[in-house]
């Protein structure tokens, strides 16, 4: 169970920007991958890593949008070591191709891409619920496919971008596809975000001895392309029901916790944590204790849940391998 040790604190907070967090960090010689980096906090995360000297690979479903983002990053930072590669996380063959084509060590993997609140229950060709397949299984396959590259770094970090939506739903181990439980767009999204946290918990347990540390985080409430499937009124109502504030972060503030986990020396040797607003989140006993944006549920940090999900994910990825 997490939070047994003192909660991690940093000098930064919900108002800090990604550029402020890494202002004094030199990432020269480091190689990073940021999934879903053609827009939103993914682009800003990639930009700040490149600004500090890292060689950054952006992944994108839309290569035109990805190359536009990469060109802007190269121009604004002066860093030419910024490239774009195609990746469709819901397509096992796309994930396998990406991992197979990666060459050399990898220092930073930021699992940032995602889909949110798909209105109707949608299954992939392999039979997985689409949000779970994209947000969790695709990133699981990517990370495990790149495990040797991460080990070769000797000091690698994995960042799993989750959400306070994890407070809405645990992983439904007996009904991952909502075949029996009534499908709700935000519950399904919440399940996938809980899975993101559990992945970081188990990845850190398994791989810390190999020099790979993993953490999960809530970036904050940010208006980005992630909400493209959501009716604005429905999103506002969901936030109201969760008790969440209507105040939103800027994209620069939303990327701050991601780059903190990815590259700040403040997290050196630290893993298996859930972060928010550049701090470690408090474990809460019920949703009533949260304002809708803060806190993490015990089930999202539970070691047994994390191991169970890893085993199931490993089996699913193997069964879907091209």
Image (cartoon, grey):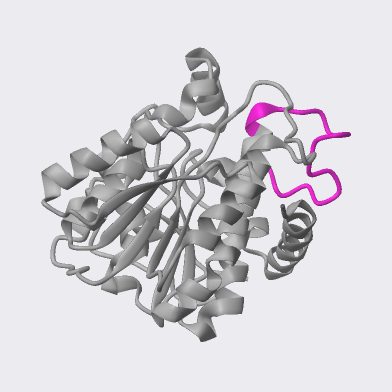
Q: Position of residue 183 (x, y in %)?
A: 76, 28
The residue closer to the viewer here, 239 or 253, is: 253
Report whether 179 appears left or right of 198. right
Q: Position of residue 18 (x, y in %)?
A: 24, 51
- Identify the residue at image location x=60%, y=28%: 117
Residue 125 visible to an observer of this rendering: yes
Residue 286 visible to an observer of this rendering: no
- Identify the residue at image location x=62%, y=37%: 189
The residue closer to the viewer here, 214 or 319, is: 319
Q: Count the marks: how many?
A: 0
Residue sitting at the far right: 180
Residue 60, picture quadrant: top left
Please check the rendered image and state whether residue 177 is part of the magenta-colored stretch, yes or no: yes
Q: Position of residue 270 (x, y in %)?
A: 42, 75
> Magenta segment, which residues?
168-186
Height in image: 153 above or below 304?
below
Q: The N terminus is located in which quarter?
A: bottom right
Please check the rendered image and state whether residue 30 is part of the magenta-colored stretch, yes or no: no
């Amino acid at each position: 169970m997490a939070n047994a040790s003192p909660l991690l604190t940093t000098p930064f907070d919900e108002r800090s920007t990604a550029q402020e967090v890494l202002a004094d960090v030199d990432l020269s010689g480091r190689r990073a991958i940021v999934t879903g980096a053609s827009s939103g906090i993914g682009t800003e995360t990639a930009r700040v890593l490149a600004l500090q000297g890292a060689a950054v690979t952006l992944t994108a479903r839309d290569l035109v949008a990805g190359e536009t983002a990469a060109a802007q990053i190269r121009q604004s930072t002066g860093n030419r070591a910024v490239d774009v590669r195609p990746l469709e996380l819901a397509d096992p063959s796309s994930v396998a191709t990406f991992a197979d084509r990666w060459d050399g060590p990898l220092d930073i993997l930021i699992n940032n891409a995602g889909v949110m609140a798909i209105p109707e229950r949608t299954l992939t060709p392999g039979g997985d619920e689409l949000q779970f397949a994209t947000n969790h299984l695709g990133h699981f396959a990517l990370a495990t496919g790149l495990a040797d590259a991460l080990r070769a770094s000797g000091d690698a970090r994995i960042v799993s971008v989750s959400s306070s939506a994890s407070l809405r739903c645990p992983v439904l181990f007996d009904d991952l596809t909502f075949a029996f439980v009534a499908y709700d767009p935000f519950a399904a999204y919440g399940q996938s975000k809980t899975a993101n946290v559990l992945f970081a918990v188990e990845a850190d347990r398994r791989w810390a001895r190999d020099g790979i540390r993993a953490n999960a985080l809530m970036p904050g409430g940010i208006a980005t392309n992630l909400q493209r499937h959501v009716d604005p009124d429905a999103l506002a109502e969901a936030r109201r029901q969760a008790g969440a504030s209507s105040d939103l972060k800027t994209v620069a503030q939303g990327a701050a916790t991601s780059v903190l986990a990815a590259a700040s020396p403040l997290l050196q040797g630290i893993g298996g944590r859930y972060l928010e607003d550049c701090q470690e989140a408090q474990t809460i006993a019920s949703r009533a204790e949260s304002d809708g944006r803060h806190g993490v549920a015990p089930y999202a940090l539970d070691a047994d849940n994390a191991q169970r999900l890893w085993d199931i994910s490993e089996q699913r990825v193997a069964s879907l391998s091209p």
